[in-house]
Amino acid sequence: MMELTLLTLLALSPRAEAVSDRLLEEAGALSVTVEDADADTADEQPLFGEPGQSIERAGWHRSVIKALFADAIGAEQAAHRLLAGEGDKVRLQAIEPLAERDWVRLTQAQFTPTEIVPGFWVVPTWHQPPAQATRVIRLDPGMAFGTGTHPTTRLCLRHVAQRAAIEGALPARVLDYGCGSGILAIGAALHGATDIDAVDIDPQAVATAADNAAAHGAPVRTGPPEICHGRYGLVLANILATPLKLLAPLLCSRLEPRGELVLAGILERQADELACAYRLWLALEVADREDGWVLMTGRAQPARVA
């Protein structure tokens, strides 16, 4: 791996911003960070005031500037020029080698197999599925939301698995609205759904979902929301509270009689707002919760008999 060099300087206000600009624009620094030199001490002072208050200073009284260079020569030359031009406003603290990290390995270390319910796991491709796993989604972090690590995704997958366990299988027709990576659509396929639409307004998400569904052999059609047709026995939407409120009439119109709507991306304090937004069509209730997030579900009215 390439060995990088870290240049650390102490700058007195208001020189920190100017020094940072010079390091990036003139000295060829790969990156620059500025920190409060008095952080966690009795001299620490907040830079930003409370809402409604004016900001009295444009920077900290003393700042630590850390600049990353590709080699020691570049760091030493930058330090020499800055010290010569800034006088006693900038002081050298250190020039030291910094081994470049294996960012791929560090990223992978953050994503480990996630158990949804006993036997049902989401497993990155660089891990082997646990021996006790009977249903597995193989999914890596990528360009679209949904890896199984976020509470809202786990809430949805858990509901899918638990409903399938109670009823034997999910309804045949399922809609994953705002599909992201397609993880919920794939989860539905693993639990018995056979006619699944996964839609998103983001073309990158649609492409990612299509690739992930194909890799699992899941019967999933992907595309923009316009591909939705007919009604579904289960509609899943893991988005955020505000768009979910706006989507109320559309999502409810896609439900079969007695079809189930499952909503996530909702904070606990937003549950009453969502219930109010959907009450014209169905009664939403909190069905599960995790880490401050809730899952809300509701059933469409049964068909009227003439």
Image (spheres, rainbow, N blue to C red):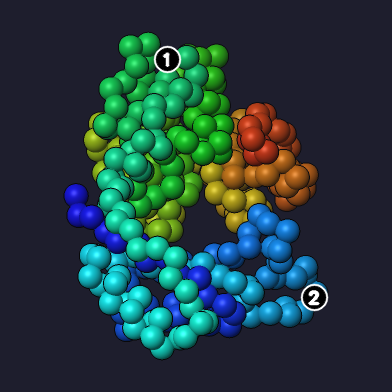
Residue 81 as seen in the image, left or right of residue 156: left
User: In which quadrant of the rendered image does the C terminus lie?
Assistant: top right
State the residue in front, 100 or 290.
100
Disc nearest the viewer among 2 and 1 = 2
Count neighbours of disc 1 (C-alpha within 10 A) and say few if under 14, some if 14 to 19, many if 20 or more.
some
Residue at mark 2: 53
State the residue in front, 10 or 189.
10
Q: Secondary structure at mark 1?
A: loop
Identify the residue shown where x is 39% and y is 50%. Answer: 144
Amino acid identity at mark 2: Gln
Spot the residue most to the bottom: 85
Identify the residue shown where x is 47% and y is 85%. Answer: 87
In the picture shown, does residue 132 fall above or below 218? above
Q: Which mark is residue 29?
A: none
Whether pointer 2 and pointer 1 mark residues with C-beta atoms closer than 8 Å, the reply is no
In the picture shown, does residue 71 fall above or below 169? below
Q: Which mark is residue 119?
A: 1
Spot the residue most to the left: 1
Q: Secondary structure at mark 2?
A: loop
CA separation in Å, label 2 and label 1:
54 Å
In the picture shown, does residue 183 fall above or below 276? above
